[in-house]
Amino acid sequence: MNKTILLAVTLAAVFTMGYYAENTIAFAQYMGNVGSEGETGAYTLEEALEIQRRRIEAAEANPASGSGTPYLDASGVVGASVIAGAVFGGIAAAFFIRGRSGKYAAMGRG
């Protein structure tokens, strides 16, 4: 395929995505339900701060509970990274091993 056409199509796709992405609206997190007269619900800023203070106190009272992120678990950060590395590393190793032999391997190199 012609490199100029491929570059033009890629640039057109990038600019099109950028044009339509500008039309999206980001809403802040809403605190509480709207009442019948349009007022904010019962979950006010003071109540939110009180709930967060209780969460911090509970975490300080139970230091063994941790943050709740299972880093070494298979569903955690490190576990998932090790599993993904093993899978993709195995695939890459298979390609490297297969690439050293075969029809298109360079003569005299194995």
Image (tube, helix red, strand yellow):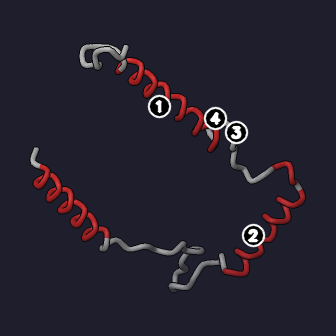
3 relative to 19, above or below = above
Q: Amino acid at mark 3?
A: Leu
Q: Amino acid at mark 2?
A: Gln
Q: Secondary structure at mark 4?
A: loop
Query: What residue did someone put label 1 on?
Result: 88
Q: Secondary structure at mark 1?
A: helix
Residue 20: which quarter of the image? bottom left
Q: Amino acid at mark 4?
A: Ala
First in residue order: circle 2 vs circle 3: 2
Q: CA distance from mark 2 to mark 3?
A: 27 Å
Q: CA distance from mark 1 to mark 2?
A: 41 Å
Q: CA distance from mark 4 to mark 2?
A: 29 Å
Q: Nearer the viewer, residue 32 or 53?
A: 53
Q: Residues within 10 Å of mark 2 (few under 14, many from 20)?
A: few
First in residue order: circle 4 vs circle 2: 2
Query: What residue did someone put label 4 on?
Result: 74
Mark on residue 52?
Answer: 2
Q: Residue at the location (31% across, 73% down)?
A: 22
Mark on residue 72?
Answer: 3
